[in-house]
Image (cartoon, grey):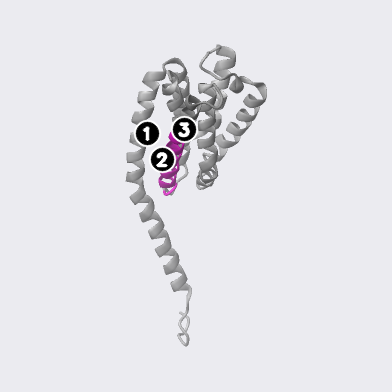
Amino acid sequence: MSGIPLIFTSGWASGIDAYAVVLIMGLFGRYGHLAAVPPTLERTDVLVVAGALFAIQFVVDKIPYLDSTSDIIHTVIRPVLGAAIGALMAGHAHTLPQAAAAAIGGSTALVTHLIKTGVRMGVNTSPEPFSNIVVSVLEDLTVAGMTVFALLHPIPAALLAGALLLIGAVLVIFLFSRTRRFWRRRRERRRLRHAGGAQPAGQPLT
């Protein structure tokens, strides 16, 4: 399967923002006449729906905690779209190569999605909202750049996507301890606040 590098990279990008991948690939296929893009992604209805969902996701992804809620919802959606894109690129319906392509795209999207979710949970522990916005914009730019790069240079893009996958996994491990400390401190503050609000019986108010 000569399309494996592109399938892998599109799966990686789908784990971050599958709607952007569908939109970018569809536009490049329709107006750039790239043979690697499945005709299904070039359809007007697909482009309109992908564009609308991307616009919603673009806004939601920049709001702290709402982005994590969206990530939970997309735990199924992103891998499914990654698998669908891979299957469409493989062609030849109901064949072993198509099943393999769907498995590569879907599993890669799932791993990337889990890494993205972990990173965002760590970023949301920051007391200010700007880091969340910065991370979201960087994700948008990376997905767009990697998708275009993969369409033009599939093998280098796949190697870069693999490296980013490893870096993301290391980052999640680093942020995990920070996230755990944040929620522990938050529980302690809540417990102390509740304990401080309870007035012992018979003790005069001061």
Residue at numbered disc 3: 103
Mark 3: amino acid? Ala
Q: Nearer the viewer, residue 1 or 138?
A: 1
Residue situated furthest top in the rendering: 33
Whether residue 177 is in magenta: the answer is no
Which portion, as a residue range, is magenta?
A: 107-125
Mark 2: amino acid? Ile
Q: Is residue 63 above or below residue 43?
A: below
Would you say 24 lies left or right of 171 here?
Answer: right
Q: Quadrant of residue 186?
A: bottom left
Q: CA distance from mark 3 to mark 1?
A: 17 Å
Report if residue 87 is visible in the image. Answer: yes
Q: Is residue 15 above or below residue 30?
A: below
Residue at numbered disc 1: 165
Which percent across, then down, holds residue 15?
47, 35
Residue at numbered disc 2: 115
Q: Quadrant of the C terminus?
A: bottom left
SS for dot 3: helix
Mark 3 or mark 1, earlier in chain: 3
**Callouts 2 and 1 close, C-beta under 8 Å:** yes
**Callouts 3 and 2 close, C-beta under 8 Å:** no
